[in-house]
Amino acid sequence: MADITQATPGLLNRNGASANLAIVAGVELGSAILLRAFLLSDETAVIVALLALMGAIFAALQLRPVLEERIVAAFHDRKRFATLLGIVIVLACPFFLQGSGYAFHLLIVSMLYAVLALALNFQLGSANIPNFATGASYGIGAYTSALLALNFGVSFWLTLPVAAVVATAFGFLLGFPSMRTKESYLALVTIAFGIVAHQLLNNFDWTGGPNGLVGIPAPELFGHSFARPIEAFGFRLPSQANFYYLSAALVGLSIVSAKRLHESRVGLAWNALRADPLAARCQGIDVVWYKMLAFGVDAFLAAFAGTIYAFYVSYISPDNFTFLVSVTIMTMVIVGGMDNTLGVIIGAFFLTMLPEKLRIFSDYRLLFVGVVVILFLILRPQGLFPQRARNYGGKR
Amino acid sequence: MTPLLEVRGLTIRFGGLVAVSEVDLALNPSEVLCIIGPNGAGKSTLFNMISGIYRPSAGTVHLDGRDITGWPAHRIAAAGVARTFQSSRLFNDLTLIDNVVIGMHTRTKSGVLDALLRPRRARAELEAAAEKAGELIRAISPDLHARRNTLAGALPQADRRRLEIARALASEPRVIMLDEPSSGMDDRDTDALMADVRRVMAERPGLSFLIIEHDMRLVAALPDRVAVIDYGRKIAEGDFAEVRLMPRVQEAYLGHKAAEHA
């Protein structure tokens, strides 16, 4: 690709540029239309057909790496356009959902899980730290903000940072014993932490015990309550649209954070830790500190997601934050592609919507997830979208 | 003159086994010291103690007069001791450039908050580091430089060692420790390696090398001095031409009987 454009600048270059535009627009709009069709269809046959189509697309990408490279090159070339179009699609999406509350709900939950998966990706993807306690950080965030709102009437916007700070403190606390342990032992420590957090939430009186916390008030912004529908451009969007935009903003924030950290000295240090901890130490990397940092960043983002979740459903109980939630988040990262932001998000959407859409299999949900994960590990062990090398000195 | 790196009475015991016992070494600025000895003599263990991977049971390590004994490995690296490994340990799933940029970890500053809140500055720092890394790789080998954006895991053995040296240089160290740099290299690669070491030393006054080596061609040609380790003890030290004639050294290498006939 690059060779051709260098050899014959001018006409071919211009053609290539517009071709890139078309590819970017086609991929983004195509994905959006596919997602919409998937969200709004409720007949099993249609759903299975759409799944088969997605499978075929991925098979094509797998068998023809050139296609994938071409698409990646197009996105790389038209970065700004791709970002803008993506934002427009996300903003416009609610107007095309026929006011279906269920579709909104699925999208919101998917986005929250995308944030959780991105949070875990800092550890599992970047630094290969198997943290099974992301669900616990998610819960700590949700409970902190819910308790603040219920007991002290603190506004949603203020609970967001407070919950994040509290969860981060717990994250560091978890990182502290973890720094002495390695690999599988570290995984065990995080599993224990997740279970302890769940049990404590279940047994304390002030957390409402197994009944959880009820009646968390809806957030308000400039006098607009998030419990009320949005009226815009002659459209009337259901009240979930408020949380849709809020979650989308959080996903955006997470993507920007992930990108900035990945393309920094910190991301490199985490990658070094993942590849060879001993060699990393000998390059002057404080392994303990960087591990704890990864725990902290993970907890920080997870708490944001937890806060939004608590205010969105207005009711939380310990069962929303079990060990199983952590395992699901981990699966999303592995299936989506370690250390690849887009892959992790798609993994989260895929694994959130799939069990919901395949209601007929719902009793076998876990079995199904297990089969999907095993298939992925065999067919595409690097995940849907594997990690890509950093670019230096290129366009930003 | 105070030595750059001074090891005194360095000892480590694993349970009842004394792997290294009372070793003294002194490395002067702009000097190459080779450590030789039979397999299992404790040479790599000695390196692991100096670089902070193992904590010595007794003895001290001083760098430029400062006591660095028992410091964690990352602080010793930051203090100016870089090293390579016997089985080269590159970051295989990262590009050559990334590998060398990681080597500059102690010479760069951006933390999480810089990366998140001042991305321009963090990015600029990394770009500058990448630029410098490219130069370091180019100086070692133009071939490697051409492959700088490929993954380190795909490199052949000789190139892996050269990249490790580039990565060690990236931290602007005072001392570089090479653990069997010529293993897996043919004569031509070994010559290139020696040329690299000499060039690097000429460009960086004061930089010293501590090298574990088995290839006698290199040991005869490159170092200023040679120290011989056997069963965890230093049994000889000095000019290679003299050391090789010492009966104790010949015994260590050839066995007692053979040494009598040598």
Image (cartoon, coloured by chain):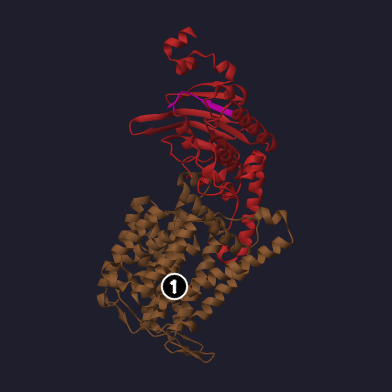
Q: Is residue A302 visible?
A: no
Q: Residue at x 53, y 54 (%)?
A: A268
- Residue occupying image coordinates x 49% and y 84%: A95
Q: Position of residue A246 (x, y in %)?
A: 48, 78
Instruction: Let me know if residue B36 is in the magenta part.
Output: yes
Task: Left or right? Give the position of B144 relative to A276.
Answer: right
Callout 1 amino acid = Met
- Tell me which residue sits at (66%, 63%) in the image: A16
Vertical position of residue B80 compared to residue A101: above or below = above
Q: Is residue A180 above or below residue A364?
A: above
Q: Is residue B126 above or below residue B45?
A: below
Can residue B234 be seen?
Answer: yes
Residue A296 point in image, percent of width and height: 44, 63
Give the letter of the chain under mark 1: A
In the rendered image, residue A230 lying in the magenta stretch gets the answer no
- Colour of chain A in the image: brown
Q: Which residues are magenta?
A: B33-41
Q: For the image shown, how many numbered marks are present on the structure? A: 1
Residue on which the image places disc 1: A111
Position in image of residue A19 (x %, y %)? 63, 66
